[in-house]
Amino acid sequence: MNKEEQVGTKLVILGGLGEIGKNMYCVMYKDSIVILDAGIAFPESDLLGVDYVLPDFTFLKENEDKIKALIITHGHEDHIGAVPFLLQSVNIPAVYAPRHAKELIRVKLEDRNIRYDNLFTYEDETKLKFGEIEVEFARVTHSVPDAHGIAVTTPDGTIFTTGDFKFDLTPIGPVADLYKMAQLGHKGVDILISDSTNALNSGWSTSESNVDYALNEMFDAYPQNRIIIATFASNIYRVKHIFETCFKKNRKICVFGRSMENNIRISIEGGYIDHKELLITADELKNYKPEEVCILCTGSQGEPLAALSRMANGTHKYVKLRPDDIAIFSSSVIPGNALSVSKIINKLCLNGVRVYTSKAYTDLHTSGHANEEELKLMIRLLNPKYLMPFHGEYRMLKRHAKLGIMCGIPKENTFILKNGDSLNLVNHIVTKGESYEGDDIYVDGNRIGEIGSAVIRDRKAMANDGILVVIMNVDMKKRKLLIKPNITTRGFVKVNENEELLRKIEYVAERVIKGELDNPHGTFLSIKQELTKNLVPYINDLTGRRPIILPIILDIKKDEDK
């Protein structure tokens, strides 16, 4: 009997704990692994040059022959963004996704020229079986269509993950399948993996229909003004009722932002959004009066290259702001983006634009995630023995665990884990398992995992203190420095304003180089090491800064011999 068989069913968490993003976890029973979601996280501002952050795929690579399928809860980036990278790294026999998410994944694969023929759609009533692992689905309410919770059952018990959810009794889309959740709870759920994003928010979240009403009020209040709305491109139900409001108010819609355009196109083709006749092109915008159009764009988080930012900066090709424009931020500010959003709002105001935000006008946005009372309702519906909060920072996970205790789950049956941890489910009993690789993997351009913490540290150092290059011409055969070393810098000091400082650095560099050349055991490597060892503290004493030292050695004699 191998190790996996001894522990029964294993739940391995590869992402989504202690963070918002890169959700990914695996259920393993004997020789079968089912992966649930494969999301990315977007880099914090200190991850210079990093495009995306991925979960660590090491566990999957080591158990590649056991993988049966990847199953997706819904189509947000923090649940599907890593799919192209996963397919390039690990053999995944099949991917199952709800209809909307499937189309988003298909576009992602096309954009990266990845051919994959085993992308399948599941419906509410679909049941999947992989050996002794059975999978079924329960529809939940979220800000994107076709969101589902997933129940995974093995002979050891049932694991249910909510995916991202809220309870909204008057949603824009379908109502959550409370009956099926209650059925699953009646049959018996052992582990509930539940969304913790809004665990710190008391009460119930605002209904999406309230936002619909608020936006209608804004259109009624400014019938003669051009309206610009910035929202999340992935919030399809928000976009849907913007279309319906514009239809009622006889306004055309001009869309800016590639992600917004893609999501709207997929949603129209899938039947999630009506009134495609309202769409006009950027070139057609000038043919309409301000009161006849609504501009729908990206940039609600102050992204510098997004459409709204370019409008605010006066660099947008098609939209020049007018003093009677109305700008609506139908979104919440993601932590860390407050300063960027504030700058954009100020620039809009400087252009005379009247700005409305969800903070000032409460019902212009609502989250797609459950507040405290909704989290309690999910626990009551599924009645789990054990609770593992996910999709949240540590404080959110802790609060969610406390809510579980309030709902009757014993404290020892709640698990606050970190990425790479695992749980063992044996005959309906859950215990903490071993830990696996759960590090962040950075994507920089086309490079996956090549950028580690050491490179990030160097990038931060260069960003903060710059780089100092020491170029030296030597004759290694004669052990001789041919001319004084050349010192040049980028991002450290201005050369023409710091000639005395650079002369001092040049003197120290020359002394170090000659010392190593006089040493019969001195090598290219030792010269570089000694230069860094001596120059870093010397420059720090003079300037209080620690630039990256880049020594470049040109062996002139060696080049001549060639």
Image (cartoon, helix red, strand yellow):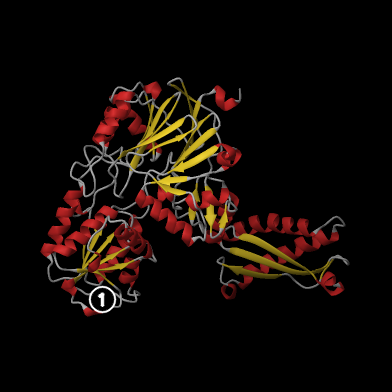
Give the quarter of the image for residue 482. bottom right
Residue at x 30% of width, y 78% of height: 283
Residue at x 28% of width, y 40% of height: 370
Considering every residue shown, the one lying at the far bottom of the view is: 287
Q: How far across and down, in percent of the image, does residue 35 sit?
A: 47, 39
Disc 1 secondary structure class:
helix
Whether 47 is drawn above or below 498: the answer is above
Q: Badge 1 is on which residue?
A: 285
Whether 459 is drawn above or below 381: the answer is below
**Nearest the eye: 100 or 470:** 100
**Nearest the eye: 331 or 395:** 331
Judge the density around disc 1: few (<14), some (14-19), many (≥20) Cα neighbours within 10 Å: some
**Nearest the eye: 491 or 14:** 14
Q: How far across and down, in percent of the image, does residue 552 sit?
A: 71, 65
Horizontal side of 2 relative to 141 (left or right) equals: right
Q: Quadrant of the C terminus?
A: bottom right
Q: How far across and down, in percent of the image, does residue 118 sit?
A: 48, 49
Whether 426 is drawn above or below 535: the answer is above
The residue type indicated by label 1 comes to Leu
Residue at x 65% of width, y 60% of height: 549
Residue at x 76% of width, y 60% of height: 512
Q: Quadrant of the N terminus?
A: top right
Residue 335 visible in the current orientation: no
